[in-house]
Amino acid sequence: MPSALFVSPHLDDVAFSCSATLLRLQRAGYSVRLVTIFTLSVQSPEGFALACQTDKGIAPDVDYMKLRRAEDAEFCRIVEVKDFAHWSFPEAPHRGYNSVPELFAGEREGDEIWRDVAAKLRGEGVPDLVFVPQGLGNHVDHLQTIRACLEVFPIQNLRFYRDTPYALREADARPSSLLPSELRSEIVPFGDADLFLKVAGCCAYESQIEFRFGGAMEVARKLTAFHRAEAQLVGIEAFAERLLAP
């Protein structure tokens, strides 16, 4: 059975970015595994790290990452992914990134957590396909994920997904310079049923959708328009997710 590993920096990136691709591969007979890297619960967060949960209406005494891990498990139930893992690496606000601009300004000197991530990724073997973010938006955790995956997996096995909702906000956002040169576009078309499942799965992340999409009612509208536009760019009907491939 062919295998596909979906690597998500945070608890929602794969869902928002490429879950229709995941659904299609499952139907094609692939063994699908979803790994989310930065999911560590940090007790009594302070400062910017605490603000990253309270600005979404989550009370300070709530274990924010535990809540988000439960949302991710619900996403996996909806899209029938039975093999998923939450890894205990701390998000950037717990590694010394102290403001929103710092999250998107590149990696801090001395932050080489990608090396530890790479060491753990080696335990995944060599899947036939590995799905990795493109780094749209330049979020430091996405950059660290890219570095780790490039270190571990053969380039021919990698597929790079368009980080969403960054791609929604900036249609012409460019992939990170960390990506190899001379990648080609790869199109994954899909229909109404997969769009419905993708939207339902994304709505499992109740703590995020107001902040990311403007509310549950907006998830379907924005994703429908976005994926229709992605398809129209390459002259096909229905909907599409666009990847980069060697």
Image: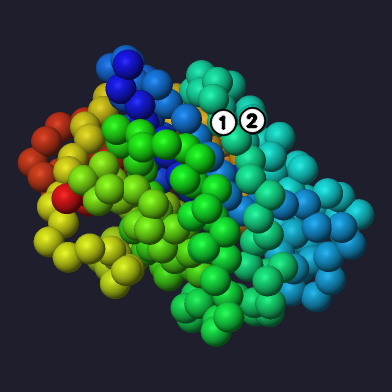
Picture quarter containing residue 241?
top left
Picture quarter containing residue 99?
bottom right
Q: Say which amino acid is labelled 1.
A: Phe
Image x and y of residue 103, in percent: 56, 74
The numbered dot on residue 84 is 1
- Disc 2 + disc 1, Cβ < 8 Å: yes
Q: Residue at x 62, y 53 (%)?
A: 38
Number of numbered callouts drawn? 2
In the image, is residue 171 above or below residue 111? above
Q: Bin the neighbour count of mark 1 within 10 Å (Cα to Cα): few under 14, some 14-19, many 20 and up.
A: some
Image x and y of residue 127, in percent: 35, 34
Disc 2 or 1, which lies upstream in sequence?
2
Q: Say which amino acid is labelled 2.
A: Ala
Q: Which residue is mark 2?
A: 73
Query: Is residue 128 visible from the viewing direction of this image?
Result: yes
| Left or right of 110 on screen, residue 240 | left
Q: Residue at x 17, y 65 (%)?
A: 181
| Left or right of 232 on screen, residue 11 | right
The numbered dot on residue 57 is none
Q: Bin the neighbour count of mark 2 within 10 Å (Cα to Cα): few under 14, some 14-19, many 20 and up.
A: some
| Left or right of 167 on screen, residue 12 | right
Q: Quadrant of the N terminus?
A: top left
Q: Secondary structure at mark 1?
A: strand
